[in-house]
Image (cartoon, rainbow, N blue to C red):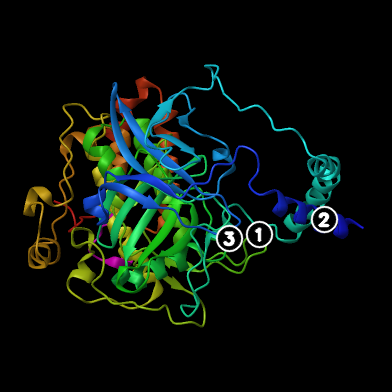
Amino acid sequence: MIICCLTFILLATFSTGPGHGEAETRECAYYNANWELEKTNKSGVEQCEGEKDKRLHCYASWRNNSGSIELVKKGCWLDDFNCYDRVECVATEENPQVFFCCCEGNYCNDRFFHFPESVPEVVFEPPPPTPSLLNILVYALLPITGLSMIILLAFWMYRHRKPPYGHVDMNEDTSLPSPSPLEGLKPLQLLEIKARGRFGCVWKARLMNDYVAVKIFPVQDKLSWQNERDIYTTPGMKHENVLRYIGSEKRGSNLEMELWLISSFHERGSLSDYLKGNVISWNELGHIAETMSCGLSFLHEDIPRCKGEGPKPAIAHRDFKSKNVLLKMDLSVCIADFGLAVRFEPGKPPGDTHGQVGTRRYMAPEVLEGAINFQRDAFLRIDMYAMGLVLWELIMRCTAADGPVDEYILPFEEEIGQHPTLEDLQDVVVHKKLRPVLKECWYKHPGLALFCETIEECWDHDAEARLSAGCVVERISQIRRLINGTTSDCLVTMVTAVTNVDLPPKESSI
């Protein structure tokens, strides 16, 4: 009986033509502020194309910089119920970073407005047409139809339930056509480039009501995109100090194809960028260092089974540096960029373990001289050397020590400049066994003195003598408890005790 009713309603719907208030959209005003970068037209008219049973809309996005309107993009928008029956392009959010509006009707986005929801909006509607007998029958059957659809939808959602954004990832079979981006969700809206790297650029984007990060790889870096996606989708690969993965996509075709990797967005950006413009307190130093070492310890750890998922293998990052360490709003760390990472699964080869990969400045001595032992522990120790350098970057910008805080510089920048060659680093790191300077004033602070000792054991020239990531977590946790639980009357005693410790000589420090 229900199927007969649904069939009758569908026939009635098709016979009545477009619904009340629906304006047909075929052309929209077009504009792209990033036209040079994206190699598109700057402005003009965009022909809207879509599925026959889907509505088409126009949209506009812009910024308001102290009263100055900066247009970002205009063009066609896919079927979105938020745009239904809107004859004008009106943004209603109170004060977003990027204003957005959509509407129905040709060129309806030519003009755009901002009316916050708190301001009452006057809507002019044409007088309703005289209801026909057919419409009365449709309205009478509408509640039954709606209830049937809700039941069917609930059943479908139960059968196809997935974690949030889980269906973003696409089938890897390249013989199949690429699915539409984020099928079933509002399309991603790229807003601005936040960073550029070896394998592409990172965009801040909008997905539904959230900001996300979109890392775009050119097609020639497909292996890096594929490797990073595989690392993120490793069973058990979820941790508060590892960047949250949302999904991946292919855009375009052939040589113009772009490979997208979508993750959570963090406004503070990388640790390197943050330290360039900010100094950090003792407590902030401890918090950043501990959460960073927790993230690396999680990567390096073999976890037999994690919440019903298969065993998580040990993972070596192989490009650990302050640029690949992101900061959340509370200054907790999440580790990102796994394009060069390697998994060590029992009984399986680790994949591409080419020796000299990563960022030169952060390469361990054994990497620089090409003398790597291609075993799991050897790759994990290479990460620990780089962690020592990142911890040095943190201490350099800490206000805990007496005296002025130096301007931010990269490791070895003082010794060999901003663009060192492989030969420069081999001479300084391998042959002369030099490391960035640990300043005398740092040893006068009890906590920083213990940090310096930990750093020296991380970047030790002898790889087998380096601390593990788990050991660094314990060290930093103990240092924080020791210093934060110490009264000011005990500080002098502690400084004396720390500086009088008879440490073995370290060739790896200056």
**Residue type indicated by callout 1:** Lys
* Residue type at numbered disc 3: His
Residue at label 3? 167
Above or below, 29 relative to 115: below
Q: Label 2 amino acid?
A: Phe
The magenta segment is 457-464
In this rendered view, identify the residue nearer to me: 433 or 493. 433
SS assignment at label 1: loop
How far across and down, in percent of the image, does residue 184 sit?
58, 55
Quadrant of the rendered structure where residue 135 is?
A: top right
Q: Nearer the viewer, residue 501 or 384?
A: 384
Q: Give the residue pinned by disc 2.
A: 8
Q: Is residue 473 left or right of residue 141?
A: left
9 left or right of 174 in image: right
Q: Can residue 286 be seen here?
A: yes
| Cα–Cα gap, marks 3 and 1 | 20 Å
Closer to the N terminus: mark 3 or mark 2?
Answer: 2
- The 10 Å Cα crowd at callout 2, few under 14, some 14 to 19, many 20 or more, is few
Label 3 and label 2: CA atoms lie apart by 34 Å
Q: Quadrant of residue 317?
A: bottom left
Q: Dot 3: what SS? A: helix
Secondary element at image label 2: helix
**Foreground residue, 335 or 488?**
335
Q: Residue at image x 46%, y 78%?
A: 174
Q: Nearer the viewer, residue 143 or 455?
A: 143
- x and y, in percent, of residue 505 in the image: 20, 55
